[in-house]
Image: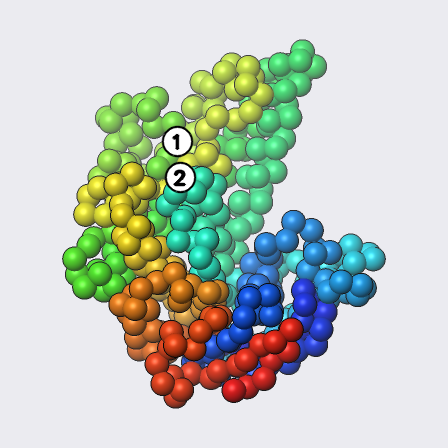
Amino acid sequence: MRIDEIFFQDFRNLAELKLKPDAAINIFLGRNAQGKTNILEAIHFASIGRSRASKDVELIRWGQPAALIRIKFFKAEVSHELAIEISAEKRRRRVLLDGGAIRFRGIIGKLNSVMFSPEDLFVFKNSPGVRRKFLDGEISQASPIYFADLLTYNRLIDQRNNLLKKIREGLASPSNLDLWNEQLAQTAAQIVLKRLESVDKLNFLANEMQREISAHSENLAVAYDMHGLQDFDEAALKNIGADFGAQVFDFERLKKNLASWYHETFKARNFSDIKRGSTSLGPHIDDLQFFINGRELRLFGSQGQMRTAALALKLSELKFLESETGEYPVLLLDDVMSELDAERRGQLLNFLRREKIQTLITAAEEAYFPARDFGKFFKLHSGLVTKD
């Protein structure tokens, strides 16, 4: 996967910008608020359909009617062009892939990218929702089926929660939950099964990266924390094919039994869910756990260990997508060089050069990088870019 050409018009503070990035490493230098992050945000938005903005209109340059993102890229050595127009007046998004219109959610998995920003250094201390978003975003880029299941599940959760509130208010019968419980159980099982398979792979890859960055002094373990297990004893869990304590899973048995487990558990929680007016079980509540040398990172990890683990996690995301799709995604590094010490910066840059990953990096200081032949440098000022 590599980007061949980028064109932006009226995106954030980028009035009009056309770039031909190098196939290897590209470095965007400039002071704060010059537009460096906007370049990466536009690419990531075209990749996953999400941005930092709460409303699409915030992505459009002030006073302009629309913003345009057009990216030419190669996937499996086949050329593609993805264009996204965001309209302020019509409040809509128009997406073209190779000249043909597609639904906006259809962009997932077309242009794969991984973005790493300073906020990611605190993923371990943030809420479970942040960690679920990380995992869901990673899997969705590799599996459109998973992304579709996720959309279906979120819709079913909203519908079940609305029904729970109506039952609590005496406006519906509890028997109406049976159908929703069954549908929700099937979709929840599919999502969790894919998450478990992915975390199993991520656990290996993240530890590999952690050991490389820490000079083989630290081991990183990633575990899936499935909500509701406290309701069942160890024998019952092993009966469905899961030993969550050891993170060992019989995926064939889980495939057969997980939906039934969810269905029975949803049913057992009907009364308590009616009282609270929301669904108390499912992948929308699950979490990820991280351990350094056997100790939970969130509770016992130092700042240095958390920074190393965050970097290892992002690099493992690259490896995960490469293993799932057959090629590395584009890597977007937004102002993280200042957050890493010299040793970690060196390890990161060595990895990128060795693996030949197309990377776009924003930074305020050129001193973070080796000699000029390291990559292609651009200077930014007020949304304008020049090749250095």
Whole-Å distance between the Cαs marked 1 and 2?
A: 8 Å
Residue at the extreme left: 217
Residue denoted by label 2: 287
Q: Residue at x 23, y 26 (%)?
A: 235
Secondary structure under the numbered disc 2 in the rendered image: strand
163 vs 359, nearest the viewer: 359
Mark before the other along the chain sequence, 1 or 2: 1
Q: Do the residues labelled 1 and 2 touch (CB within 8 Å)?
A: yes
Q: In this view, does 210 lie to the left or right of 127?
A: left
Q: Is residue 332 left or right of residue 125?
A: right
Residue count near mark 1 (Cα–Cα under 10 Å), binned few <14, some 14–19, many ≥20: some
Residue 89: give its label.
none
Q: Residue at x 57, y 63 (%)?
A: 41
Secondary structure under the numbered disc 1 in the rendered image: loop
Badge count? 2
Q: Where on the picture, by quarter, is residue 70?
A: bottom right
Amino acid type at mark 2: Asp
Residue denoted by label 1: 227
Residue at the extreme top: 170
Mark nearer the viewer, 1 or 2: 2
**Residue 351 to residue 304: above or below:** below
Task: Give residue 213's position: percent from left, percent from top.
Answer: 25, 63
Q: In this view, does 115 lie to the left or right of 225?
A: right
100 vs 61, nearest the viewer: 61
Task: Give residue 200's position: percent from left, percent from top.
Answer: 30, 50
Amino acid type at mark 1: His
82 vs 342, nearest the viewer: 342
Q: Which residue is drawn at 61% across and 76% down?
A: 381
